[in-house]
Amino acid sequence: MSNTVADPGLAVIVLAAGQGTRMKSSLPKVLHPIGGRPLVGHVLHTALDLGPARVLVVVRHERDRVAAAVLADAPEVVVVDQDEVPGTGRAVEIALAQLPDFTGDVLVLSGDVPLLDVDTLSSLIRAHRESAAAVTLMSAILDDASGYGRIIRDGAGGVSRIVEQKDATADEAAVTEINAGVYVFQASPLRTQLARVGTGNAQGEKYLTDVVGLLRGEDLAVSASIVRDVALTLGVNDRVQLAEAGRILNARTVRRWQLEGATIVDPATTWIDVDAKLAPDVTVLPNTHVLGATVVESGATIGPDTSLVDCEVGEGATVRRSDATLAVIGAGATVGPFSYLRPGTVLGAHGKIGTFVETKNSTIGEGSKVPHLSYVGDTTIGRGVNLGAGAITANYDDLTKHRTEIGDEVHTGSHNVFVAPVRIGDGAKTGAGAVIRKDVPAGALALSVAPQRNVEGWVEKNRPGTGAADVAARARSAQKADDGTQEEDR
């Protein structure tokens, strides 16, 4: 987002007060996410990138939740509360009251129309100023215009008025040019005409669209600019439209990174959030999600079947069939398949986190390997370390998390448990099956060996009648017979 005021003659009002009942959701409509941002977040980012003097967001339904989300994403905007009078006209009227001395152009956007881009809106503003119109609205031609306000033109092709779906006659409802809900007004005539708008319509609302007819009645110029790409005007009113907007946005995002030099093998099954970044020569394999603020450096390969959330992946790294969140994966490192990297994992250059390994809040040094079947939590591992299969850092004592520290060039046996807090010195070794409860000095071999004890006949005595008891009895009899034969031979 740009914080620079590049256009002091422009103010933007974002309408985000509606309930969105067709979403059938406890979450306010404008907070439903696509591409890693809420709907209204996309609108705000685009609005701020225009460099306006002010951006105002009008809220009402679930006011506190929406306002908090808006300010978290764009703290520089002004949140305005709509009163009990319903309608888009009233929302804009209240927002304008926060701009008493503003005399420039007012761009009105909807918080549930997330796909509009800076170029399209800049063209609309430029056309408005060139025509010196009192208002320029964005329109689109749809095969099925159901649910949208219709653009009604006069005999000369000029815009006469806008009619909402529920107020339209049969002839008006047959019109296929629709109001996209995006307007650029001159501020002064907008203030004047909003004061004249009433609520005498089927919805009992103060419509912003009524201003168009009033401006025409004052012989002021009204123009409409037909957008070339109808998809940009897609509004979200239900879950079907939400998914479609998400699909279009994702396709646009994937294409952008392809044109920047990334190889996306299967765009249809690859999802990339708008804040993620891919360097040239990155390869993304099918069924992969690159989410949040994930950054993937040149030459890395991600996927297939992988999800990265807010991760950093170094040059030439490989992540296969794995799930990672808030993790750092070093250059040339390998992860997976079937690895789970939880927040705080840092894997050094040329390191390895292998099959069925879970890590959390741990640093694994350069060239170190946790190859398989292990849990590493709250641990610092040095350089050139190899943890044997089945390693567990037991970090929790039922009250507090403790850390394990493993020095450089440590090699551990299979099925080791490190009971934190504990330190393994540089170059130390551990034996298979060891439970390490005490610090191990540098270069030492740590063993925890107990004598093996065999209780003869236990199965036959304690599990009589089972298959195990039967085969054990036969084996014991055969062994006795064999021992007798050997005795006779001697």
Image (cartoon, helix red, strand yellow):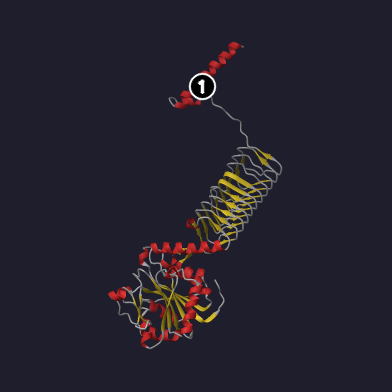
Furthest toward the right, the residue is 443
Relative to 268, say whether 150 is above or below.
below
Furthest toward the left, the residue is 170
Which residue is more in the foreground, 398 or 336?
336
Q: Exactly how many numbered labels are in the figure?
A: 1
Which quadrant of the rendered structure holds the N terminus?
bottom right
Which residue is more in the foreground, 20 or 289?
289
Relative to 305, say whether 275 is above or below.
below
Q: Position of residue 112 (x, y in %)?
A: 42, 69
Q: Secondary structure at mark 1?
A: helix
Res 188 → quadrant: bottom left
Q: Position of residue 187 (x, y in %)?
A: 45, 84
Three-letter code for the amino acid on which mark 1 is drawn: Ala
340 with respect to 381 (left or right): left
Q: Is residue 99 visible?
A: no
207 with respect to 73 (left or right): left
Q: Position of residue 146 (x, y in %)?
A: 33, 69
Furthest toward the front, the residue is 156
Relative to 383, say whether 151 is above or below.
below
Structural crowding at the residue carrying mark 1, measured as other residues with C-alpha within 10 Å and reported as few (<14), some (14–19) or many (≥20): few
Relative to 29, say whether 470 is above or below.
above
Q: Residue at x 53, y 64 (%)?
A: 256
Q: Is residue 109 visible?
A: yes
442 with respect to 208 (left or right): right
Q: Position of residue 61 (x, y in %)?
A: 39, 70
Which quadrant of the rendered structure holds the C terminus?
top right
Q: Residue at x 32, y 79 (%)?
A: 199
Res 371 → quadrant: top right
Look at mark 1 in the image and give the residue it sits on.
Answer: 475
